[in-house]
Image (cartoon, rainbow, N blue to C red):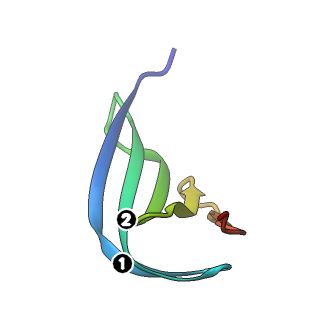
C-alpha cells in the first residue's frame, strides 16, 4: 500500500484566458500529491476559480508527462 501526503496551496490571483473569455482575479490553487516515503511530487493538479463563476480552468500533470488541460466551455444564465 502506498501512502501519500496532499499539499493544497493558494498560489496567487491571476487573469485567465479561457475558451469562453477573459476572467480576472482568478484564485490559482495547486494540489500536490507527494510520496509519504520521500516527499517527492507524484502528481500536480492546478485549479483556477473565477469570482461569481467558479472553476474556469484545470490542469493535471505527472512528473515527466504532458499536462492535461480542461477549460470552461460555456456559461449558464
CA gap between label 2 and label 1 equals: 7 Å
Residue 7, above or below 57: above
Q: Residue at x 31, y 42 (%)?
A: 7
Q: Mark 1 — residue?
A: 14
What element does badge 1 sit on? Answer: strand
> Which residue occupies the foreground of this view, 16 or 36?
16
Q: Residue at x 51, y 14 (%)?
A: 1
> Where residue 43 sits in the image (x, y, percent)?
50, 47
> Where residue 27 sits in the image (x, y, percent)?
35, 65
Q: Quadrant of the C terminus?
A: bottom right
Q: Residue at x 36, y 78 (%)?
A: 14
Residue 33, above or below 13: above
Q: Mark 2 — residue?
A: 28
**Label whose residue precedes the other's in the sequence (2 or 1):** 1
Q: Are marks 2 and 1 in contact (CB under 8 Å)?
A: yes
Mark 2, residues whose alpha carbon is within 10 Å: few (<14), some, or many (≥20)?
many
> Which residue occupies the foreground of this view, 7 or 19?
19
What element does badge 2 sit on? Answer: strand
Left or right: residue 12 versus residue 29 is left
Q: Residue at x 39, y 66 (%)?
A: 51
> Where residue 37 sits in the image (x, y, percent)?
34, 28
Amino acid at each position: 500500500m502506498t501512502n501519500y501526503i496532499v499539499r493544497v496551496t493558494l498560489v496567487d490571483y491571476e487573469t485567465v484566458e479561457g475558451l469562453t473569455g477573459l476572467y480576472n482575479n482568478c484564485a490559482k490553487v495547486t494540489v500536490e500529491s507527494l510520496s509519504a516515503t520521500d516527499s517527492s511530487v507524484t502528481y500536480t493538479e492546478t485549479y483556477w476559480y473565477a469570482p461569481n463563476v467558479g472553476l474556469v480552468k484545470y490542469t493535471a500533470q505527472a512528473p515527466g508527462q504532458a499536462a492535461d488541460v480542461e477549460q470552461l466551455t460555456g456559461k449558464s444564465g
